Amino acid sequence: MTCAARRIIAAATITAAGLLVIAASAATQTESFTAVFSDRPCGARLCGDGVIDPYGRVTTITVFSRRTPGPEPGCHTYKGTRTATLVKNKRSTLRFAIQGPLCGAHAWGTFRIVSGTGTFSNASGSGVIWGAPLVVHYYGVMRLDR
């Protein structure tokens, strides 16, 4: 094999490898994530609705698996899951693992996206929660495999 042929093969290999890296990077989209959820008690859970920007209106169900004292007297720390379903596409859901304290009129904590279906297929991400006990805002990042 000539030197020129080896250079052409090497250049083609490097180009192909570069295209694979670009394709893999384009397949995962990371975007900022914001949502607002309004809840009401429904049995042992919270039911509600909200908006996930820019995807639209959702309905939600929140189930708490654990409640512990803290971080101050009169406060409790909660751990649980929230499932949000797009109103315009009931097959598109996001499931969050949530945790954080509730102290009087203030609630805060963290969330992690643990699964998604439909529009949110293979979603992942995390962020912070801030708000009142029944109206909370989620701020963070979400990664979607496209």
Image (cartoon, rainbow, N blue to C red):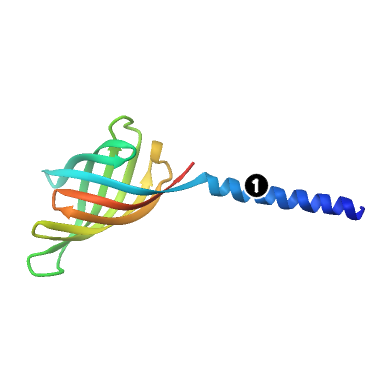
**What x and y, as percent, mark residue 21?**
61, 51
Q: Quadrant of residue 41?
A: top left
Residue flagged by tag 1: what amino acid is it?
Leu
**What x and y, as percent, mark residue 110?**
27, 58
Quick check: 93 left or right of 26?
left
Observer-nearest of 7 and 117: 7
Residue under circle 1? 19
Q: Please give the name of the residue rendered at 68% of the width and 51% of the height, measured from the top-left corner.
A: 17
Observer-nearest of 86 and 4: 4
The vertical placement of 107 against 71, above or below, is above
Q: Please give the name of the residue rendered at 18% of the width and 40% of the height, measured from the top-left corner.
A: 48
**What x and y, as percent, mark residue 115?**
37, 47
Observer-nearest of 52 and 119: 52
**What x and y, as percent, mark residue 107?**
16, 57
- Tell me the SS state at disc 1: helix
Observer-nearest of 115 and 132: 132
The furthest residue to the top:
88
Quick check: 58 left or right of 125?
left
Q: Quadrant of residue 119?
A: top left
Quick check: 7 left or right of 98?
right
The vertical placement of 3 against 45, above or below, is below
Badge 1 density bin: few <14, some 14–19, many ≥20, Cα 10 Å: few
